[in-house]
Amino acid sequence: MLYITLWLITLITSSFLFYKVSGSLSLLKPNLISITYYYSLLVSSFIGPLLIVLKLDENYMIHRMQDDTYRVIGFLWLCYIMIIIPLTMLMLSKWVGFNAKKEFHLYLEAPITTDLRESKDYFYIFSILMLFSIAAIIYMITQLNNVPIIAALTGSSDLGRLRIEASHGFTGNVLFKNIFALGLTPILSLIAYVYYVKTKLLRWKISFMLMFVLSVFVSVYDLQKAPVFFYILMFILINFYIGKIRLSLKRLMMLGSVGVILIVTMYVFIQGVTSVDQFLSYNSGPVGRLILSQISPFFLHLELFGNQVDFLNGRSLPNILLQFYDLEQVRSAKLVMGQYFPDRVAEGTAGVLNTVFAGEAYANFGYLGILFGTIYLGAYIQIMYIFFIRMPKNPVFISLFVFFTVNIPRVVVGGFMDFIFNPFWLFVFILFLSTLFCLKIKQEFLRIYIKQAH
């Protein structure tokens, strides 16, 4: 009863704080904060721990844990996370004078700012980026022995191994693949879409259609189920933010039904799951994956690091930084998989056991990593939210806002070091901000030249 009471108090307090800092927790007005709250924290990270601490989880990962003390320790840390993240956001908002409810409403009502001349200038730069993206996708395909989605369509029965090879056994330049093929492609499709909606120009329509097809391909090529759903979510959000659609309860239920049908279809054809009990069970299938499989590795992290394995002390940072110190990257999620599921590693069907950011923070820096990492994460997300809300509502910034609105919540339940240094996010900011800055400089010079000529 004590754990249930603490869970309920935490839930109520956290929900109130998230409402204050987001401007809206309504499902009909989704935003970066509300998606982080509902998906990353409430569903993926806070329902499961109550079952785990009460020993009602019946989860295959938790059964590998040897010390049940970590059921309680993990539960208490997650209660801390649920409170401290929004509390940090609230303090930061008050410090910078950010009125979430008012400013989010004004952002939704604001018109898109662009003009035809800017569209023409930007299209040339966009075309160059599009060529890089296409080249990277071709490069990625040529570096794979088998493309899992093609193997699935041709009837291959070894899809589990092919998925792991495609995701974690890529032998080419990973940075080039991740930045230009997997990362940049969906962003370019969003930008092209907004420009087309605004200008109705054929060149933007063709660009969008091409990048849309390629974006769907890079979302499903390795048979992961989540990326394509997140890409669909990006399109829902982009249409919502530019005022093309208004979400209603009926429309939300329709989208939810389509999502459920797609999930069931993918589980049936990719994983061969046909039992209704598996789909509806709280600890297996889609439901179990959401509320238990995502958070269970956090408890394994707590038991493993500092006891059986030394803390990583920052070795989970990207290779681009570690190479200066002659260190090799070690992701905690991979170590946990190897320690608790060596049989799967030996079979070649094991990937990584990603979990809430606190798992990787703890694996690298111990309990201090969770303590201060939670504060850092709350500040990071709120700064991003305030930044985009206050930026001009043009096609580039809207598209970037939607991209981060969907991808930040994904990283919250994927790791911590990406919030310390993420090469792709840094690349995106520098690329698009510098492009917009150069275009503004050009326009200002033209304005001065025309004025002097007259």
Image (cartoon, helix red, strand yellow):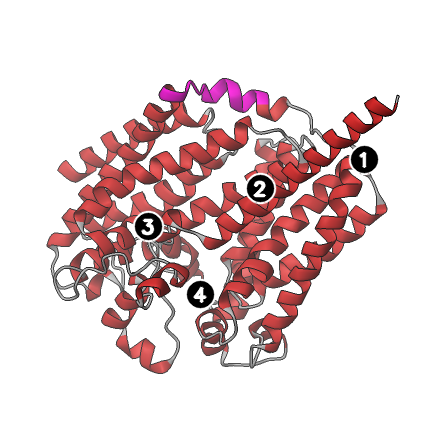
**Label located before the other in sequence (4 or 3):** 4
The residue depicted at 67 percent of the width and 55 percent of the height is 129
Give the label on residue 406, or none.
none
SS of the residue under disc 2? helix
Give the label on residue 275, or none.
4
Q: In this view, does 261 lie above or below 103?
A: below
Mark 3 → mark 1, Cα distance in angstroms = 44 Å
Mark 1 → mark 4, Cα distance in angstroms = 55 Å
* Left or right for 117, reference 110: right
- Disc number lying in front (3 or 1): 1
Q: In this view, does 296 lie above or below 248?
A: below
From the image, give the main secondary structure of the stretch colored magenta. helix
Provide residue 306's location: percent of width, then percent of height. 14, 59
Is residue 196 visible from the viewing direction of this image? Answer: no
Is residue 241 visible from the viewing direction of this image? Answer: yes
- Disc number lying in front (4 or 3): 3
Mark 2 → mark 1, Cα distance in angstroms = 20 Å
- Disc number lying in front (1 or 4): 1
Task: Identify the residue under disc 3.
Answer: 356
> Range of the magenta residues?
95-106
Give the label on residue 400, or none.
2
Give the label on residue 116, or none.
1
Q: In this view, does 368 lie above or below 297?
A: above
